Amino acid sequence: MVKYTEKLTSFTLPVIAMRGMVVFPDMPTGFEATREISVAAIEKALESDKKIFIVTQIDSSVDIPEQKDLYKIGTIAVIKQALKLPDKQYRLIVEGVARAEMTELHKYENGELYADVIKKAIALDDNGGIRGEALIKNAIDRLNTYLKFAPKLSKEATVAINAISDPGLFSDFIAANVLFKYEDKQEILEEFDPIKRAELISLILESEIDILKLEEDINKKVHDRMDKSQRDYFLREQLHVIREELGNTEPEEESDELYDEIVKKKLPKAVEDRLLKENEKLSKMAFGSAEATVIKNYIDACLELPWTKKTKDRLDIKSAEKILNEDHDGLIDVKKRIIEFLAVKQLAPELKTQIICLVGAPGVGKTSICASIARAMKRKYVRISLGGIRDEAEIRGHRKTYIGSMPGRIVNALTQAGSLNPVVVLDEIDKLAYDGHGDPASALLEVLDGEQNHAFRDHFIEIPVDLSDCMFIATANTTETIPRALLDRMEIISIKGYTASEKISIAKNHIIPKQVKRHGLNRRILKFTDASITEIIEYYTREQGVRNLEREIAKICRRAAKKIVSGEAQTLTIESADIINYLEKRKYKKDKIEKLPQIGVVNGLAWTESGGELLKVEVLTMPGTGKLELTGMLGDVMKESAHAAISLIRKNAEAFGIKDTNFYNKTDIHIHFPEGAVPKDGPSAGVSMTCALVSALSEMPVRTDIAMTGEITLTGNVLAIGGLREKCSAAYANGMKKIIIPIENLDDLDEVDEEVKQNVEFIPADSIFDVLRVALCGFKELESASETKVKAPSATDFENTNISISEIRVPVNITGMRS
């Protein structure tokens, strides 16, 4: 009878939770510790007696395990070597001491895990005697059988196995060095009785032997079938030669199947005739030959094309309009164009679709509105990314004579959609490239021409494909890089940036619900106030679209989720004051507006890719020789505006109230645009520069609550500008009370945000005198200069006409008209 000696000891030790790995007593094991909880436990153990409790996780995917996620039985080990890596991780070599059972798991503030464990050491008298020796011999026999199928052990391991006489240690050694599954290793670890452990290792090895025998049998059958396939190939080739000698040209089995499929599809006559002809060629070719493979792929590609399948359009205008409004706020021009198309489609179903190109800054919703259009029309949606394509074959396909030939992206899009009339989005059409492989932009000319695309020829398919029912929508960030011929085939719809109020609406109706749901939260747990959304828009994002706004809201959701999971809060309402705690310091700041009028400093307005901006113009005069200096990374257009402004002022110095009319010989002028590292170019800065120059030369201060935009001519006329909507929003956001705009831009005020129109006073200007009269403090036109000053139609001349202010169609209060 086997005699045991059992000893129990209790400990409280730091815990390392292993994933897919088991450590055994009396055996050195090396591994890397990467998780913070493991690193914390190692450092605690190194500070004391280097003992640590190593236990395996039940579920390896759990990052921070609890007691239910860990096996109860683990190993008490001693850290023999600990190497700290640069990334705050450890590479360890530990040696197991004894098995132990975990009774309770604790989690401390610093993150490390501790466990109360009971060490169980069971020793056999005389290594179990005859029974122990018999069990070891039986296990060695099974191990030798197992090693016939599995990789061989090293000589050192074989010698070690033969030298072990303790059944328990023998079982642990085999489990650690032979078994693959950590579940089997854990099963061995959980058995404290050395005799039962030796019996268990034999059973596990026997089970593994049965599995490996079955795998070997399956592999043998697969090999036999491969030999049979080669034999069948040889016989089939012989049969093919015999058929040719007999003049028998009937299709073989594979071609028979293709023949049935071609006929069953009920394809157009021209397509069916071509495919039947190719199938006849295939039946006469050697099985497995390169040419036969090409023809088979060609027939399969043609059969996958939806030659006769079309979806039925939803022509209900109200339903379509409702869907478009649900998915997107703003984008009025795009929605209007789609509704008009559906209306015409009802009256003229045979109308071929025009090609639309949506042009706008990144993040304004060009691609997503295309998906909404497809949903509104009940059409299939497919997207083709054109960014960086430089090979014509990507559009038209490769000819079948080339190795690896395939259809082009247009044909693949129809196959993917499974319909002949999908909504096809040609994304980033402005980023096409070209090189020695051809010009893909030229290849698109046929695709996007309504007069030609009813018979589009792909180089691989070769049969004309009707693309006239497809609705092609291209997207681009700019039209400047799109070739003129390609641009001429498309109807350009410009998508302007969103105003602050539109961004707030988009965030509340679309972005926040999507991000809250994506991060496992709901609107009851996490709420955003309007003030918090405004804070994010004004101080953390600067863009025309909402892409960065969505990123910032996602960041808040992640950090809110952390607070909720850690128990810091059950519900959260994000106020404007809380934003700095979630997104840290503000990324952007508003321009500082001086309260008192300033000499030579004017608030101009500029349009940028990220929207409108307040652009200050500073002018400084000093005694000199008439030198003009321009700083602030100005482009050629702005430099020309500065020279034009100087010429205008020289001609009308007296009318502008400049005492020293010979200033251009005695005074040096420095025009500066702050933020000199940012390049600036384009029209609309002429009015601002002229006003700043007159202020500096006449020493009349400029009002700081007025912003202005407009280009100037040599005769003093104020010309119309673009981007009025974005510029006005920027002026309002920076606290401007009045905005001077060109009189020719009055009709564009319809596009300005309603909130801006209600809070800002718009002053139309026809000449530079209209600008100076409002902007400069104390400006008066001199009577003596009345005949010499520039006489151009001004806003004041409306009094002498029969046109009333209401006829100008300006929905705001217009001031600046003199009596």
Image (tube, grey):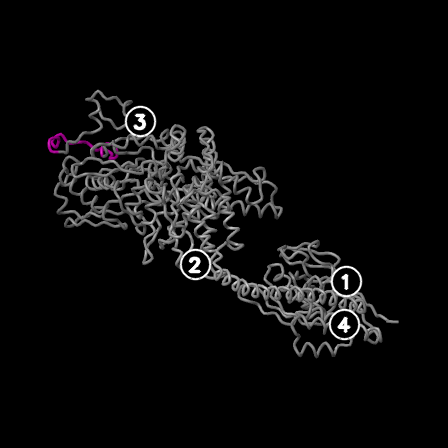
What amino acid is labelled 1 in the image? Ile
Identify the residue at image location x=63%, y=71%. Answer: 81
10 Å neighbourhood of mark 3: few (<14), some, or many (≥20)?
some
Quadrant for residue 468, please give it. Answer: top left
The spot of residue 667 in percent (x, y) is 16, 47
Reading the image, the residue beneath label 4 is 139
- Indicate which disc, 3 or 4, sits on the residue closer to the N terminus: 4
Reading the image, the residue beneath label 3 is 810
Locate residue 698 relative to residue 286 in the image: left or right: left
Magenta region, residue range: 772-788
Check whether the beta carbons of the residues at disc 2 and disc 4 lie within 8 A of each other: no
Residue 341 is one of the magenta-drawn residues: no
Q: Indicate which label's residue lies in the foreground, 2 or 3.
A: 2
Which is more toward the observer, 472 or 333?
472
Reading the image, the residue beneath label 2 is 404
Task: State the SS at label 3.
Answer: loop
Q: Indicate which label's residue lies in the foreground, 3 or 4.
A: 4
Identify the residue at image location x=25%, y=21%. Answer: 804
The spot of residue 472 in percent (x, y) is 39, 41
Q: Indicate which label's residue lies in the foreground, 2 or 4.
A: 2
Task: State the mark number for residue 118.
Answer: 1
What amino acid is labelled 3 in the image? Val
Locate residue 19 relative to residue 673 in the image: left or right: right
Cα separation, mark 1 vs mark 3, equals 86 Å
What amino acid is labelled 4 in the image? Ala
What amino acid is labelled 2 in the image? Gly
Which is more toward the observer, 70 or 728?
70
